[in-house]
Image (cartoon, rainbow, N blue to C red):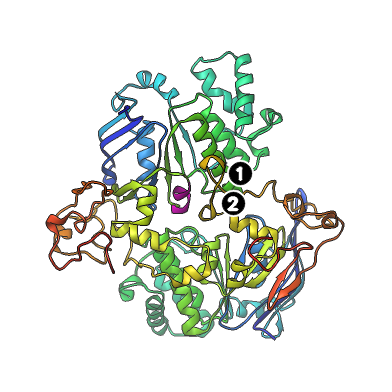
């Protein structure tokens, strides 16, 4: 049993345009002290998958099935009052936008202390002291002064560190970070990624990192799930994934990066393109969702959906015609 | 030597107390792509806006094709607008949602009275084909298009008058990787085929490495280093450029974990009150006394090496203790 086991998770939303299939059966596990990246492009379902764990999806319109077990305890059916004790204490979230996820009218010290007072029953003074310690933990200088400041007095990078401090205040088992560095400049991003690495090393926190940036995945994750159209296309330890991508979509993403440019005819620099567009989430095709854009496609790709198949230790890919063990398929 | 398409001299733009651009000079030659790189608040977008006179410079001069346009009236500026066009970052808000694609792309032609409606139709169709959109798209509205298609429309609108200069402000930053790749290929092809010059503004080093001939790195309203793309990436000379390159994500787990990252202290200081001396000295791991008082110039004393505004590369202020040589060792 892993720390977190997600099994056959399906999430849909009822909308005016019909039923949106956001996540169509995804399974993965998370071990203690592991950094798992959920990656993919806009609309692939990575955020919905992760937000289903702390049950942060709107209950009125969400249709969810499958199982989410934290330490063996089923979260999908947990009564809301009990879930409230899980949220923020055992599973916590760092959101993408540090500008809007902090309350502008309270000091950052108050906002960190609020979590501690709620979940840990700390006194006001003890919570304040612990808030300063947490700011120090996430690398904010002069924490005793900073706890008295309001969010607008902090830079974007500092705000994101405050968000992380709030998220780790109760030493959660699982920390979910949704594009935590996307809004930040690269020189600031490097420091914030170091904070996550440090938290994992020092506190053993397991982290689910949602990102579209393969550079961030390569930098910090232990393992990655590449998602496409609501399903896992490929799942592997990060070094294995980058050395031997098996799914044509993973390979396509890697070759589309500007860093992977090749010099083509007439000395022109070219990037590999992935033609076509992501299929609409309103429809659910029978075959492989990637087939229309896939350079490897054959007739069978349309007929049935390729299951996730093992291609090596801990390496899974959902493709009938995967790349071989070398770099090129 | 042919006249530069764009020349900016000592450009200053202050928004009230905010010193967004504070003494910046650059030139772009015929058919050249200059990548203007910087982090948020460095002033890079303000430079682009000043070039198009979308905002009025506080001081300095902007010369387009040999003509000083800094103080031209709106009316006098109008014919020159044929030669300079802009591509914006957000393909969702930069197209009028009530206009069809045909109306959007033909507007520059009609506005400058360069074509009748009938002629415009043909030219729009041809332009759309160049940017990889089918002519059926002409009757569509922006909301019916994907982000990548909208950015192609933005390019078609910017290029339909065959401008000499295109200012592109983060044109691919809002796009997913797979879409970004096709738009970057398209920009490269169009630039080679049509020969326009380009001021390409971005925070993304890998994007400028892909398509720029030359790069200028901005920090707090000033250029700290500029040079040919290959030279700047092979041998960054300013400590800020070095930090920026070392912090950029590398999509290779082995390299990403082995490399030595230069982690900068603190945050970018406020452009309300930039630090005295070198603006980077508050975060620079190599700063010494002169850096806190004397502002380094972007002049290069040695020929054949690209310029960087740092006392470590312009030796007169450098203490003997600092390491001489071409690259700065940490």
Q: Is residue B34 above or below residue B273?
A: above
* Residue A211 part of the magenta-drawn span: no
Mark 2 neighbour density, 10 Å: few (under 14) some (14–19) many (20 or more) = some
Instruction: Judge from the rendering whether residue A210 lies leftward or rightward of residue B58; answer left or right.
Output: right
* Residue B206 part of the magenta-drawn span: yes
Cα distance, mark 1 to mark 2?
9 Å
Mark 1 neighbour density, 10 Å: few (under 14) some (14–19) many (20 or more) = many
Q: Which residue is mark 2?
A: B176
Q: Is residue A241 above or below residue B303?
A: below
Residue at 53 percent of width and 39 percent of height: A266
SS for dot 1: helix
For the record, the magenta segment spans B205-210
Chain identifier of the residue bearing label 2 in the image: B
| Percent x, y of residue A85 | 61, 80
Residue at 58 percent of width and 13 percent of height: B116
| Percent x, y of residue B107 | 55, 23
Nearest the viewer among A61 and A298 is A298
Q: Which residue is mark 1?
A: B147
Q: Is residue A317 above or below residue B19?
A: below
The quarter of the rendered structure image containing the C terminus of chain B is bottom left
Instruction: Judge from the rendering whether residue B300 lies leftward or rightward of residue A108; answer left or right.
Output: left
The reply to whether discs 1 and 2 touch (Cβ–Cβ < 8 Å) is yes
Answer with the quarter of the image where residue A251 lies. Answer: bottom right
Nearest the viewer among B249 and B47 is B249
SS for dot 2: loop
| Percent x, y of residue A307 | 80, 67
């Amino acid at each position: 049993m892993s720390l977190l086991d997600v099994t056959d998770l399906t999430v849909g939303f009822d909308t005016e345009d019909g039923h949106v299939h956001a996540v169509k059966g995804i399974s993965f596990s998370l071990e203690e002290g592991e950094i798992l990246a959920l990656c993919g492009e806009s609309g692939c379902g990575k955020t919905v998958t992760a937000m289903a764990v702390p049950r942060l999806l709107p209950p009125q319109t969400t249709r969810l099935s499958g199982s989410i077990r934290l330490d063996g305890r089923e979260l999908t059916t947990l009564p809301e009052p009990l879930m409230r004790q899980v949220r923020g204490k055992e599973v916590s979230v760092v959101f993408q936008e540090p500008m809007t996820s902090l309350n502008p009218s309270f000091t950052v010290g108050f906002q960190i202390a609020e979590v501690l007072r709620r979940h840990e029953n700390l006194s006001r003074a003890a919570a304040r002291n612990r808030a300063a310690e947490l700011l120090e933990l996430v690398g904010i200088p002069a924490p005793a002064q900073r706890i008295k400041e309001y969010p607008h007095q902090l830079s974007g990078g500092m705000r994101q560190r405050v968000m992380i401090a709030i998220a780790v205040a109760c030493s959660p088992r699982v920390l979910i970070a949704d594009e935590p560095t996307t809004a930040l400049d690269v020189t600031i991003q490097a420091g914030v990624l170091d904070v996550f690495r440090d938290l994992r090393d020092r506190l053993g926190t397991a982290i689910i990192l949602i990102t579209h940036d393969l550079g961030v995945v390569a930098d910090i994750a232990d393992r990655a799930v590449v998602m496409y159209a609501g399903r896992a296309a490929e799942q592997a330890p990060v070094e294995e994934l980058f050395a031997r991508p098996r799914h044509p979509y993973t390979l396509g993403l890697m070759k589309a990066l500007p860093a992977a440019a090749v010099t083509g005819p007439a000395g022109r620099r070219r990037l590999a393109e992935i033609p076509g567009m992501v299929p609409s989430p309103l429809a659910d095709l029978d075959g492989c969702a990637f087939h229309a854009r896939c350079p490897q496609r054959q007739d069978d790709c349309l007929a049935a959906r390729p299951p996730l198949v093992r291609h090596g230790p801990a390496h899974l890919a959902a493709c009938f015609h995967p790349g071989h063990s070398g770099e090129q398929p | 030597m042919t006249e530069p398409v764009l020349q900016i001299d000592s450009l200053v733009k202050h928004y009230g107390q905010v010193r967004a651009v504070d003494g910046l000079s650059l030139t772009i030659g015929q058919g050249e792509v200059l990548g203007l790189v910087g982090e948020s608040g460095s002033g890079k977008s303000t430079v682009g806006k000043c070039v198009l006179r979308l905002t009025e410079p506080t001081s300095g001069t902007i010369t387009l094709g040999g003509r000083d346009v800094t103080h031209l009236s709106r009316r006098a500026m109008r014919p020159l607008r044929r030669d300079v066009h802009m591509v914006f970052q957000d393909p969702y808000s930069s197209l009028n949602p009530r206009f069809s694609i045909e109306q959007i792309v033909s507007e520059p032609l009609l506005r400058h009275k360069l074509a009748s409606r009938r002629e415009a139709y043909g030219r729009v169709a041809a332009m759309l084909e160049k940017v990889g959109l089918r002519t059926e798209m002409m009757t569509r509205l922006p909301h019916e298009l994907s982000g990548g298609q909208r950015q192609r429309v933005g390019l078609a609108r910017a290029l339909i008058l065959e401008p000499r200069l295109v200012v592109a402000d983060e044109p691919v930053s809002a796009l997913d990787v797979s879409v970004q790749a096709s738009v970057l290929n398209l920009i490269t092809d169009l630039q080679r085929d049509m020969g326009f010059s380009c001021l390409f503004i971005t925070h993304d080093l890998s994007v400028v490495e892909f398509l720029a001939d030359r790069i200028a790195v901005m920090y707090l309203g000033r250029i700290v280093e500029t040079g040919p793309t290959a030279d700047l990436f092979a041998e960054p000379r300013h400590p800020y450029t070095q930090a920026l390159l070392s912090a950029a994500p590398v999509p290779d787990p082995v390299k990403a974990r082995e490399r030595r990252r230069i982690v900068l202290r603190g945050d970018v200081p406020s452009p309300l009150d930039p630090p005295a001396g070198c603006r980077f000295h508050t975060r620079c791991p190599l700063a010494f006394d002169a850096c806190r008082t004397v502002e380094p110039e972007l002049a290069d004393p040695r020929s054949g090496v690209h310029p960087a505004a740092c006392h470590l590369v312009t030796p007169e202020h450098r203490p003997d203790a600092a390491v001489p040589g071409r690259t700065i060792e940490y």
